[in-house]
Image (cartoon, helix red, strand yellow):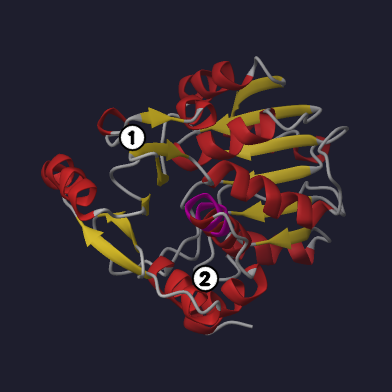
Amino acid sequence: MGKLFGLVGHPLGHSMSPLMHNTEFRELGLPHHYQPFELKEDELEEGIKAMRLLGVEGFNVTIPHKVSIIPMLDEVEQEAMEIGAVNTVYRKENLLIGANTDGQGYLQSLLKLTGEDSLVNKNVLVIGAGGAARAVAVSISRSGVSSMTIANRTVEKAEKLSDVCRPYAEVDAISLELANLSLEAYDIIINTTSIGMSPDINNVPIPVQDVKEGVVMSDLIYNPLETLWLTEGREKGAITANGLSMFVEQGALAFEKWLGIKPDRSRMTETVLNKLGGK
């Protein structure tokens, strides 16, 4: 008998998670189904109770529920607590356990890009201090990175995120203006903001004229597949990557938590690319 999995959030019409997971279930010959559960903020608590009764085996969590769902779960993994958000829930002995695969998903996608198994001796700049930045920064700080700087329009928000990461790594918080004056110092620059996302495709999170050749520029956005920021970086000699790999990795890690088996990441990537009309 097949198991039921799903996605909790609002709105969900844009999400490619159902297509990605259901395609993988089918290709692996598994009788499972992944269902979107559209829940508004005032419907979340009752919705989670209903999912317990229905025996939903696991589900992803997206905007706006990644933080508000935490008190409704039985346990939350340590890294998810430090990130302050849950994007994956799985069952363990009839308990609902919260996890966050966003950060580890991003870290794995970044290590594929750098061609190394570690970020030691790398100076990393994280642009932004919101929810996505928090997942990325916490996981990178726990990975053994040499040093990390968090740059944000509001420095106070960057400082708060830095405080969370400092037990694991050397972390600074600066303004975007100051970051722009020292871009040549960084080996890896990560945009975690929504600047450049469709339909607002003509803006960049930070200018690229002073980046050094060979710098890794990573954008969490994957629609469009190449933002203007990445295009400009590539033209300056940067190694560039969009957020598609992170999306696939976080989904694959959730898949593993639910079923204990590894999905085909290449096939998952192809599924999403085909839907986006990319190559």
Q: Residue at x 55, y 19 (%)?
A: 164
Q: Residue at x 54, y 30 (%)?
A: 79
* Mark 2 residue element: loop
Q: Quadrant of the N terminus?
A: bottom left
* Count of labels in the image: 2
The amino acid type found where label 1 is placed reads: Val
Q: Quadrant of the C terminus?
A: bottom right
* Mark 1 residue element: loop
Magenta span has 255? yes
Residue for badge 1:
67
Residue 238: image x %, image y %? 80, 58
The amino acid type found where label 2 is placed reads: Pro
Q: Residues within 10 Å of mark 2 (few under 14, many from 20)?
A: some
Among numbered discs 1 and 2, the one appearing first in the sequence: 1
The answer to which of 133 and 226 lies nearer the viewer is 133
Magenta span has 13? no
In the rendered view, would you say 29 is above or below 97?
Answer: below
Residue 256: image x %, image y %? 56, 54
Q: Is residue 105 visible?
A: yes
Disc number lying in front (1 or 2):
1
Which numbered dot is residue 104?
none
Residue for badge 2:
224
The answer to which of 136 and 3 lies nearer the viewer is 3
Q: Main secondary structure of the magenta part?
A: helix
Residue 4: image x %, image y %? 32, 63
Report the magenta residues as a range.
Answer: 252-258
Q: Residues within 10 Å of mark 1 (few under 14, many from 20)?
A: some
